[in-house]
Amino acid sequence: MEFLASGVQIFESTLRVSTPLLFAALGGLLSERSGVVNIALEGMMLIGGFGAAAVALSTQSPVAGAFGAIFCGALFAILYGLFVIELKADQIVAGTAFNMLAAGVTPFLMKVFYDSSTSTPSLPLELRFQQGPVWISWVCLGLVWAWLKYTPSGLWVRIAGEHPEALDSAGIRVKRVRWISVILSGCLAGLGGASLSIFLASSFSRNMTAGRGFMALAALIFGKWKPVPTAIACLLFGFFDALQIRLQGVVLWGSEPVPVQFIQVLPYLVTVLVLAGVVGQSKAPRSLGVPFQAN
């Protein structure tokens, strides 16, 4: 019975900690299926996490905080789209720059609004989400899967990443499709950040994403840019994240516990190993990262 209870706890923890990854990975999927590389997921999560915490604190409502995260993520995505879609900046370089921008802007905003560059004030338990983001993330997965598979606009997104010239010849504006995909990507990544600051934690702290945006990209590559396999990859990474939390303080030999730093590196090590095994087998959308020039 104790083993069963422990398994249930790890399963519940896996669902919880994989929620930010799933939101961000779905956002990255929409952007990249339309042909726009989104290295900036990490920055969008940071901005969304801060926006969620700030709005939830001012309104005393986690729901308002979630909408604040969506707005901040979308705003950041619009700025990113301006550079990579309209100005045709290198998408890898631009995404890296936007991650650095978010990492610098969020401590500045915390200092301005809360006189602290490390974290925002804590939200009480009753003003945080309990299970809602878990269910919403899986609803979003179903919606994204159905949209891409069964709707004309979802087909446009897929064609924009594979054969944008064909889409353009059919009279569909490729840039518009990519703009919508990137903005939706920012909204979902912002929700991923909100899942960290007002769901898994009680406040936003500096660089609290801790590489989860890149783990979401890894899940996207592992899932071969398909919604359901990508969600399974998020669960895999979430499982090892939950496992490392359970293993902290465990004694494997002698009387000294394993150093916590070795335990904390586990999910990142798994990410690297998984990518090393599948990155050569994953086929990205054909026009991913290629700016489109209308005829």
Image: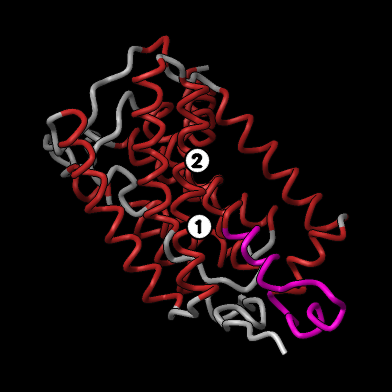
Mark with earlier residue (2, 1) = 2
Magenta region: which residues? 161-182
Taking the spot 35% from the left edge, 57% from the top edge, the residue there is 268
- SS of the residue under disc 1: helix
Out of 62 and 234, give the one closest to the viewer: 62
Q: Which mark is residue 258?
A: none
Find residue 281 and report its horizontal and vertical position in percent: 60, 79
Residue wearing tag 2: 71
- Please name the residue shown 63% across and 32% down the image: 136
Majority SS type along the magenta span:
helix
* Quadrant assignment, res 293: bottom right
**Looking at the picture, does residue 60 appear above or below residue 40?**
above
Q: Is residue 114 above or below residue 181?
A: above
Q: Give the CA distance from mark 2 to mark 1.
A: 10 Å
Q: Callout 2, which amino acid?
A: Phe
Amino acid type for the residue under numbered disc 1: Ile
- Name the one closer to the observer, 228 or 213: 213
* Residue positioned 44% across, 53% down in the render: 76
Q: Would residue 162 be counted in the magenta stretch?
A: yes
* Residue labelled with disc 1: 78
The spot of residue 255 in percent (x, y) is 12, 34
